[in-house]
Image: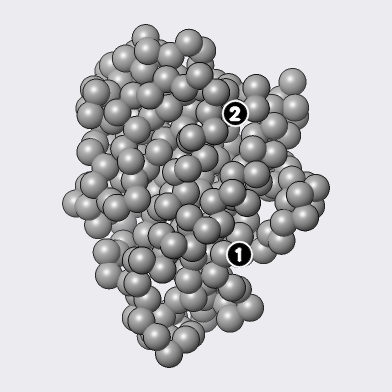
Amino acid sequence: MDPVIQEAASFIRSRIREVPRTALVLGSGLGSLADELQDPVVIPYGEIPHFPAATAPGHAGRLLAGRLEGTPVLMMQGRFHRYEGHEPSRIVFPVRVLKCLGVARLLLTNASGGVQPRFQPGDFMLMTDHLNLAGCNPLVGPNDEAIGPRFFDLSRAYDPALCALARRAAGELGIQLHEGVYAWFSGPSFETPAEIRMARILGADAVGMSTVPEVIAAVHCGLRVLGISCITNLAAGILDQPVTAEEVFETSRRRGPVFSALMRRIVALAEEEAS
């Protein structure tokens, strides 16, 4: 495997007490789950060799290791986006580092705009598939066979067993969990009403500016993937009002406690499944 990936993984391994099997990526405004970690080890991204810098608002730029209700986990409090100027291969560098560490399950979360009028701000959506509308793929370029194959299948990118656990967790907690397709646009501008109409015609239920490259890279290197979206706003053109970043962050913060409860239960069920 790429020595740059190994160097970053070795540094993280030297700083944490144990290597968890589960890692979470916390999306915009959803980083408060990290506050619930027991005895956390906090590593700023800037200290990890070769890690990109997180510049997006609402992304603290820290890797945390600890226990979530007794289950060991790693948490990325913030991610990297194409609109920040990162090349797609850099966006997914942390995913490959997590795999090198020994992580087996990657739980991805994001804030997204609802394309379907039935959605309301604050709803949650289980990602069952995605549309890559950003015009790029993180695996373009030479392929490292030590990481994964040149060509690979994405028809079951969102692990069916983990999706079943998410449905079970939501049911136990009485949380409505929609299901749907997430469409990736590069940003940083929010989508136009015409782009939202196009996305709906193509089958999208929600839109956002992240997650899809991480899913592609995770499946490529053999990680099991789960994706959960917090619908923070209705996408452009559905309501006669502009979309704002403030609305996204306010909804994420408001729904933070419910989101945290859902993710805690999913993590616990995933650990039970593996034991």
Q: Is residue 62 above or below residue 258?
A: above
Q: Which mark is residue 68?
A: 2
Nearest the camera: 207 or 38? 38
Quarter of the rendering containing residue 91: top left
Q: Residue at x 54, y 51 (%)?
A: 256
Secondary structure of the residue carrying numbered label 2: strand
Looking at the rendering, in which quadrant would you find the C terminus? top right
Amino acid type at mark 2: Leu
Whether residue 160 is visible, yes or no, is no
Identify the mark nearer the N-term, 1 or 2.
2
Whether residue 255 is visible, yes or no, is yes
Q: Position of residue 177 (x, y in %)?
A: 68, 59
* Residue situated furthest bottom in the rendering: 240
What residue did someone put label 1 on? 123
Q: Residue at x 37, y 42 (%)?
A: 78
Is 258 left, or right, of 223 in this rendering?
Answer: right
Secondary structure of the residue carrying numbered label 1: loop
Nearest the camera: 221 or 166? 166
Amino acid type at mark 1: Asp
Count of numbered labels shown in the rendering: 2
Q: Residue at x 34, y 33 (%)?
A: 62
* Residue situated furthest right in the rendering: 172
Give the spatial CA distance, label 1 vs label 2.
23 Å
* Residue situated furthest left in the rendering: 85
Q: Position of residue 17 (x, y in %)?
A: 48, 10
Q: Which mark is residue 41?
A: none
Q: Residue at x 23, y 38 (%)?
A: 53
Nearest the camera: 197 or 70? 70
Mark 1 Cα shell of 10 Å, populated few (<14), some (14-19), many (≥20): many
